[in-house]
């Protein structure tokens, strides 16, 4: 059986395989914010010829069904089939906007006072070939040459030695040695390569979020970002948050499934990036992984079960530098994979990477750092102390669990203004053109504007009589942000979406307030607030305050930093010194478990309003 695309690709189908899996197997990726569960409605394809056994139509409208649109994750072809993939269903690898955002990263790295100096190093060696008179063994010959270069006492693994003899002879004794300083500060040989093969040097920085996965492909010599890929984390199919994933790993024996899901997401991106730039896997010398503690455990196939159970203890916070082969990554199996260290069960390498990226650990002023993702992670402190906590926000700001939500990539509505008299919205879209959905910053804008114009009340309920743009939809009342008459596709925010967003902002605000109380500080003591998250170009601080998501403080104290987990992973990839700094940050952080504080629940309940039940906390919002 064959699956044909209107763009001419042909894929051989496996027995009872859904279209989504067949496409993924062939390197064609669809937006799949539910990981293929059939609930997000984002993996739409149009059947042009042939038929399918449709497991579920999910959220598809009657009109879409009549136009032969199906969900790729819910449709099994019944024979040869021809399909069309709409632009909005395609996952963008190599987003130009995202690449543009990274153009100053080398400069940023140098602003720490360090140079490009990856922990993984290469050394050119010209060994004298053995003779009857110079007949020491291959390993002794290599060690002799290393001693001459001042590299004494290097460690050699069995994997290295077992392939060494062949490589030396194939390369005619002129080789490049890739090596690293191990955890005990001894150097360790990683692999040998002939000088004319695999001689370019690349590295990967990877952010494993609960909802999204981002990969930077970087040149290890110059620090330049060559390309970027991102996708939804396919583990979404097993649950939206870390708790449901841990339950799946432990109670349904699903650890391997979860591990496979995320590793295949990363490999899919890496394979595409390597193909786009004609890079061989042996040229990827190193990778750095940054993720929360659960994601880091699952990535390495470690049981995350005890993270969920009191007293909430992970298997480990400092991960040894295991190899690409152990990680099952499609890079050189010998290449070291560094995991940014975690702090505790619910504060992981992503926040350590974030603090590193913010530089708050270097300054004397007291700063607050918050990473707004599926988990809201918060740190407060300065160059002397750091306290941290985490709360569960759900995936809405990353575009999942919201009817028309999407990640902050091309086609996403990123800002919204609503006319207070006509209630007509004006929107701006990342990269321009027709919007395909709404991202986190657009949601913050839209809801605060709806609140200011009276389209929703303090509880987030839509006021129907105000405008015809508020209508009855499949999930109850909804507000039409954008109407696309040509494609019969409206972009709406439903009352359920608004409820989800209010719950998320309330959790974050309650987390910040509880942490502040715990360290005995008031809002006034905070001199800087660093905001991180996959929001795209910006987040409108004023509107986030109106929403009651951020503390009501002067705007100039806020700094928006974008995805700091990936920035921190990049810094650790490119600089041995900054990697050590990340280790220091992790050791310095004191973790507070919010769930044991009764005040956290009280704060949360009070924050389930716009902006808050206690308006004295929001003096500038009137
Ligand atoms: Fe198919 Fe979500 S509905 S991936």
Image (spheres, rainbow, N blue to C red):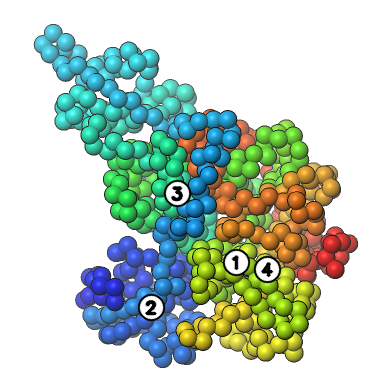
Front label number (1 vs 3)? 1
In the image: residue 340, left or right of residue 2:
right
Relative to 314, say whether 550 is above or below.
Answer: below
SS state under label 4: helix
Q: Secondary structure at mark 3?
A: strand
Residue sitting at the far left: 132
Residue 409 in the image: above or below residue 81: above
Residue wearing tag 1: 414
- Which one is earlier in the sequence, the residue at label 3 or at label 2? 2
The local secondary structure at tag 1 comes to strand
Mark 2, other Cα within 10 Å: few <14 / some 14–19 / many ≥20: many
Residue shown at the point (43%, 82%) measured from the top left: 56
Picture coordinates of residue 544, whole percent (x, y): 72, 62
Pointer 3 residue: 216
Q: Position of residue 498 (x, y in %)?
A: 67, 74
Kindly indicate whether the residue at mark 4 contacts the one at mark 1 (C-beta within 8 angstroms).
Answer: yes
Q: Is 100 or 5 nearer to us in this picture?
A: 100
User: Taking 28 as reference, is 463 left or right?
Assistant: right
Q: Residues within 10 Å of mark 4 (few under 14, many from 20)?
A: many
Residue picked out by circle 4? 445
Q: Which mark is residue 448?
A: none
Residue 140 position, x and y percent, is 25, 16
Q: Is residue 97 visible?
A: yes
CA gap, disc 2 to disc 1?
25 Å
Q: Residue at x 47, y 62 (%)?
A: 232
Q: CA distance from mark 4 to mark 2?
A: 31 Å
Mark carried by residue 45: 2
Around disc 3, counting alpha carbons within 10 Å, would you say few (fewer than 14), some (14 to 19), or many (20 or more)?
many
2 and 1 marks in contact (CB < 8 Å): no
Q: Of the residues under marks 2 and 1, which one precedes in the sequence? A: 2
Which comes before the other along the chain, label 1 or label 4?
A: 1
């Amino acid at each position: 059986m064959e699956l044909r695309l209107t763009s001419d690709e042909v894929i051989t189908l496996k027995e009872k395989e859904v279209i989504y899996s067949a496409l993924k197997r062939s390197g064609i990726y669809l937006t799949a914010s539910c990981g293929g569960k059939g609930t997000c409605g984002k993996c739409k394809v149009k059947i042009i010829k042939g038929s399918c056994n449709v497991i579920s139509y999910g959220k598809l409208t009657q009109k879409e069904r009549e136009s032969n649109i199906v969900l790729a994750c819910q449709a099994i072809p019944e024979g040869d089939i021809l399909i069309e993939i709409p632009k909005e269903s395609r996952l963008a690898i190599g987003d130009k906007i995202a690449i543009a955002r990274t153009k100053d990263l080398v400069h940023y790295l140098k602003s720490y006072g360090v140079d490009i100096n990856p922990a993984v190093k290469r050394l050119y060696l010209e060994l004298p070939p053995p003779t009857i008179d110079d007949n020491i063994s291959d390993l002794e010959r290599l060690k002799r040459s290393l001693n001459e270069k001042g590299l004494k006492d290097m460690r050699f693994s069995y994997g290295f030695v077992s392939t060494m003899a062949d490589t030396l002879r194939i390369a005619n004794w002129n080789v490049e040695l890739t090596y690293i300083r191990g955890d005990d500060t001894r150097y360790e040989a990683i692999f040998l390569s002939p000088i004319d093969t695999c001689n370019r040097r690349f590295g990967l920085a990877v952010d494993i979020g609960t909802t999204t996965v981002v990969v930077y492909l970087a040149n290890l010599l110059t620090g330049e970002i060559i390309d970027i890929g991102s996708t939804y984390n396919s583990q979404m199919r097993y649950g939206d948050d870390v708790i449901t994933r841990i339950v799946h790993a432990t109670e349904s024996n699903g650890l391997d499934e979860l591990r496979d899901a995320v590793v295949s997401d990363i490999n899919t991106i890496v394979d595409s990036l390597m193909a786009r730039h004609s890079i061989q896997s042996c040229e990827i010398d190193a990778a750095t992984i940054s993720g929360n503690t659960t994601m880091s455990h699952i990535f390495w196939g470690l049981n995350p079960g005890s993270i969920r159970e009191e007293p909430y203890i992970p298997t480990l916070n400092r991960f040894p530098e295991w190899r690409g082969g152990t990680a099952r990554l499609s890079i050189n199996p010998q290449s070291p994979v560094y995991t940014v260290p975690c702090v505790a069960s619910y504060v992981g390498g992503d926040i350590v990477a974030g603090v590193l990226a913010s530089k708050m650990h270097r300054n004397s002023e007291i700063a607050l750092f918050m990473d707004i993702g599926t988990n809201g992670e918060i740190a407060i402190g300065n160059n002397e102390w750091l306290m941290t906590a985490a709360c569960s926000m759900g995936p809405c700001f990353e575009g999942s669990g919201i009817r028309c939500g999407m990640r902050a990539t091309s086609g996403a509505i990123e800002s919204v203004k609503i006319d207070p008299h006509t209630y007509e919205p004006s929107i701006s879209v990342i990269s321009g053109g027709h919007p395909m959905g709404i991202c986190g910053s657009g949601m913050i804008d839209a809801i605060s504007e709806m609140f200011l114009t009276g389209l929703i009340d303090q509880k987030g309920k839509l006021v129907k009589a105000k405008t015809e743009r508020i209508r009855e939809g499949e999930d109850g009342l909804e507000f039409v942000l954008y109407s696309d008459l040509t494609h019969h596709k409206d972009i709406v925010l439903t009352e359920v979406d608004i409820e989800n967003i209010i719950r998320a902002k309330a959790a974050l605000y309650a987390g910040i307030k509880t942490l502040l109380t715990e360290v005995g500080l008031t809002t006034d003591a905070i001199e800087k607030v660093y905001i991180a998250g996959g929001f795209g170009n910006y987040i409108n601080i004023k509107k986030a305050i109106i929403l009651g998501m951020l503390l009501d403080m002067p705007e100039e104290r806020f700094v928006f930093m974008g995805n700091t987990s990936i920035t921190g992973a990049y810094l650790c990839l490119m600089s041995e010194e900054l990697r050590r700094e990340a280790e220091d940050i992790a050791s310095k952080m004191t973790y507070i478990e919010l769930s044991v504080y009764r005040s956290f629940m009280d704060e949360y309940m009070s924050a389930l309003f716009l902006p808050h039940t206690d308006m004295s906390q929001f003096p500038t919002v009137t």
